[in-house]
Image (cartoon, helix red, strand yellow):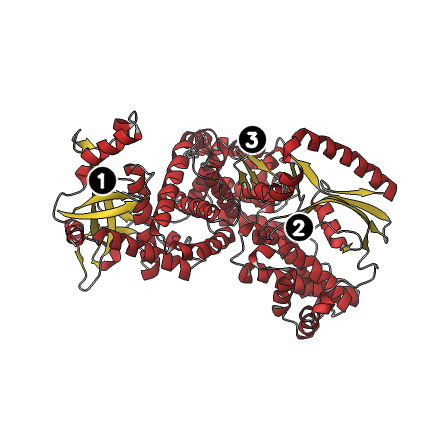
């Protein structure tokens, strides 16, 4: 599985940071087909 | 180096590309991006029929507009096959993105309640250990990129649909938990007092304009701490303020898309143009933009969930609109117009003035007979076009007619009942002066509409609303007169002042000279253009050297200035104090005073600075105000009366100032005006 890092504001929760980054709310994990196209996101907080 | 190999850059890159597409489109189409989608509707997935959300919705709407698709349905390659169609050769797909947050500990989607009771450190540790985020981009094609895609049912905007949309927006306004007050010249939400202020409905040109403005302000009100609790601390002109404007505009767009509401009009265009300026800056910070999109989606969800009252509309339907049988239609016709109107539009105070006892049957009979006097039809719709449109829409619905048929019945009868529409004047000089007035007003309205599209709509919309009726009336009159404009320099300068002052917004770079020059540039009559050009491009001639006379009678005879306020941007200047003006022609005295509210000195109206000793004021500034209300400029028969009034006001203001203690002096001087303005979100 591919991995990618996104950098977010250090004060934001994971949920807040991801919704701000993507500009929408999450869907259920079941709705994402777990195939090779899925990318795992690692969150890096600014200032760390 | 190892890290570069470990992490791909697909997600950042593709999300940024989506945002860039949206921003570029908005930048290149500042007046169209919000209304263009109305041609095809909210983007949906053709298989699930679900509407796309957030950035996906915005992106697909923009792609559709850019590629001129008229179908709102989208599918993946496999879904196209599933529907028995296929993608045309050579067609290119576009991405939509989804993500999920999974909890390895609970083996379910992550629920924030899991970490709600933890400290920040515990929460971070839990999230680091168990919470995983996954994302995936799907490639989708528009229905028009496919072969033989199943036909869709197009929802035509009939009168029933128009009525549904109007009632839906009315229910949103009626259910707003921030109270809505009507009056004044501006539309704004005050976070300080948590209330919404709108001009009275009759000041809007169309219902669509009114609804669009109301939705925009309601969107702002969701930021209050009792609702979605957004950061609303931005002062006017700041980036935070601009972000909140962006949220409000986007949420209004989402709300309209998701509820099938189509609001068009200049309000949207002007706001869009204003936002386009800010969006250029957003190119450098994509997440600020996507966060605003997410916030806008939540605002739209909040309003849909809390304010859209389906049962209310149903109640009106059941009681008043159920026309499925002839008997029920008869029943609906027997309902009094006032009863219907005050139930369906409880926020419109004009409903109270509809006469009692007139039923829809009486109203309909008058229209059908062509005799509008039988029930004084104008009185029924309170001589207001918005009320008339609503009553006509309902009448059309309960009589199973088209709205246009009802309207045309009325129009024919109305035109027959009128004396010749144009009262032709005999005096050629007056006709010429009228032609000058029309030419300058017409040019000024073009400036407001075309040249000042980047200015906040509060100014340009207010201007158009203020002069809309006058412009239409003059157009007819001048066309009938057929006389060329007068080029009398005193008249021209006086009219130029009258129509340029309300358009002057220095904050946006439109000082009075710039406005006057723009007006002169748009004058069509060659002789008048020469005269105006001479006046406005010769700076000295702009200085008001006209002696006090009939055309310029207002002279400041007394003034008192206590404080002088200015903010750092130079946008607002404010003098606390008073000015007494004398109209020598009419021998009337006017008191132009500042007001003191909650520790703050405010300008009662507009951008005009109160004249000081030696300055003059045009009569139009006084007369216009009196026509709209006398709340801030008071007329007296003698200067002594004016002084006496001011002395009482001074006593009251000084008492208030004492109450506010620390808020006075330096604090007021430096902060009051900008704070007051910053809390009004337009």
The residue where tag 2 is placed is B417
Up/down of B167 relative to B410, above or below = above
The residue where tag 1 is placed is B100
The first of marks 2 and 3 along the sequence is 3
Looking at the rendered structure, the secondary structure element under dot 3 is helix
Q: Which of marks 2 and 3 is in front?
A: 3
The residue where tag 3 is placed is B339
Up/down of B437 relative to B101, above or below = below
Q: Nearer the viewer, mark 2 or mark 1?
A: 1
Q: Quick check: can you spot residue B201?
A: no
Looking at the rendered structure, the secondary structure element under dot 2 is helix
Subunit that carries the residue with mark 3: B
Q: Which residue is drawn at 86% across and 44% down?
A: B639
How far is mark 2 from mark 3, CA to CA? Answer: 27 Å
Q: Quick check: can you spot residue B617?
A: yes
Label 1 neighbourhood size at 10 Å, few (<14), some (14-19), many (20+)? Answer: many
**Foreground of the two, B2 or B79:** B2
Residue B658 location in percent, x, y?
A: 70, 30
Q: Do labels 2 and 1 share a chain?
A: yes
Residue B347 location in percent, x, y?
A: 55, 34
Looking at the rendered structure, the secondary structure element under dot 1 is strand
Which quadrant holds the N terminus of chain B? Answer: bottom left
In the rendered structure, find residue B262 and report the number of the disc placed on it.
none
Subunit that carries the residue with mark 2: B
């Amino acid at each position: 599985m591919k991995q990618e890092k996104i950098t977010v504001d250090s004060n934001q929760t994971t949920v807040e940071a991801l919704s701000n980054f993507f500009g929408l709310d999450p869907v259920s994990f079941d709705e994402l087909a777990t195939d090779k196209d899925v990318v795992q996101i690692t969150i890096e907080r600014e200032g760390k | 180096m190892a890290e570069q190999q470990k992490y791909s850059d697909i997600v950042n890159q593709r999300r940024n590309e989506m945002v860039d597409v949206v921003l570029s489109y908005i930048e290149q189409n500042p007046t169209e991006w919000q209304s263009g989608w109305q041609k095809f509707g909210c983007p949906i997935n053709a298989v699930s029929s679900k509407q796309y959300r957030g950035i996906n919705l915005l992106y697909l709407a923009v792609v559709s507009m850019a590629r001129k698709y008229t179908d709102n349905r989208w599918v993946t390659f496999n879904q196209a096959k599933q529907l028995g169609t296929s993608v045309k050769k050579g067609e290119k797909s576009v991405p939509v993105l989804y993500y999920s947050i999974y909890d390895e500990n609970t083996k379910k989607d992550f629920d924030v309640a899991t970490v709600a009771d933890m400290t920040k450190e515990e929460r971070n540790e839990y999230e680091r250990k168990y919470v995983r985020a996954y994302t995936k981009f799907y490639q989708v094609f528009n229905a028009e990129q496919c072969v033989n895609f199943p036909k869709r049912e197009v929802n035509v905007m009939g009168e029933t649909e128009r009525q549904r949309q109007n009632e839906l927006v009315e229910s949103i306004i009626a259910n707003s938990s921030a109270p809505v007050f009507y009056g004044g010249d501006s539309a704004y939400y005050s976070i300080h007092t948590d209330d919404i202020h709108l001009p009275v409905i009759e000041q809007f040109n169309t219902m669509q304009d009114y609804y669009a403005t109301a939705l925009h302000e309601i969107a702002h009100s969701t930021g209050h701490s009792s609702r979605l609790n957004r950061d609303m601390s931005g002062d006017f002109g700041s980036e935070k303020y601009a972000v909140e404007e962006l949220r409000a505009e986007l949420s209004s767009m989402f709300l309209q898309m998701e509820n099938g509401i189509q609001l068009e009009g200049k309000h949207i265009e002007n706001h869009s143009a204003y936002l386009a300026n800010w969006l250029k800056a957003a190119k450098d910070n994509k997440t600020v933009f996507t966060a605003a999109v997410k916030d806008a989606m939540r605002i739209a969800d909040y309003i849909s969930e809390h304010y859209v009252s389906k049962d209310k509309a149903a109640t009106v339907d059941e009681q008043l609109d159920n026309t499925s049988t002839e008997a029920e239609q008869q029943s609906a016709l027997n309902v009094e117009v006032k009863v219907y109107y005050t139930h369906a539009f409880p926020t419109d105070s004009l409903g109270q003035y509809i006469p009692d006892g007139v039923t829809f049957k009486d109203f309909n009979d008058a229209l059908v007979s062509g005799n509008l006097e039988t029930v004084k039809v104008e009185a029924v719709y309170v001589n207001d076009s918005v009320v008339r449109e609503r009553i006509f829409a309902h009448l059309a619905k309960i009589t199973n007619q088209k709205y246009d048929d009802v309207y045309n019945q009325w129009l024919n009868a109305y035109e027959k009942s009128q004396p010749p529409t144009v009262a032709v004047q005999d005096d050629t000089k007056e006709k010429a002066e009228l032609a000058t007035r029309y030419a300058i007003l017409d040019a000024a309205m073009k400036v407001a509409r075309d040249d000042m599209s980047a200015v906040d709509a509060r100014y340009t919309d207010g201007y158009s609303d203020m002069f809309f009726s006058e412009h239409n009336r003059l157009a007819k009159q001048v066309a009938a007169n057929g006389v060329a404009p007068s080029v009398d320099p005193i008249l021209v300068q006086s009219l130029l002042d009258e129509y340029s002052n309300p358009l002057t917004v220095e904050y946006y770079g439109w000082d009075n000279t710039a406005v006057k020059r723009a007006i002169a540039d748009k004058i069509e009559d060659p002789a008048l253009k020469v005269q105006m050009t001479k006046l406005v491009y010769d700076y000295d001639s702009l200085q008001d050297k006209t002696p006090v006379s009939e055309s310029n009678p207002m002279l400041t005879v007394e003034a008192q200035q206590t404080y002088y306020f200015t903010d750092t941007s130079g946008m607002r200047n404010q003098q606390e104090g008073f000015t007494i003006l004398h109209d020598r022609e009419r021998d009337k005295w006017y008191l132009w005073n500042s007001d003191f509210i909650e520790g703050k000195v405010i300008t009662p109206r507009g951008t005009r600075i109160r004249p000081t000793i030696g300055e003059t004021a045009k009569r139009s500034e006084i007369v216009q105000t009196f026509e709209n209300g006398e709340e801030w400029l008071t007329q007296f028969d003698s200067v002594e009366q004016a002084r006496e009034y001011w002395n009482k006001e001074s006593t009251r203001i000084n008492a208030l100032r004492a109450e506010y203690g620390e808020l006075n002096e330096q604090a007021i001087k430096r902060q009051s005006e900008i704070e007051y303005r910053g809390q009004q979100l337009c």
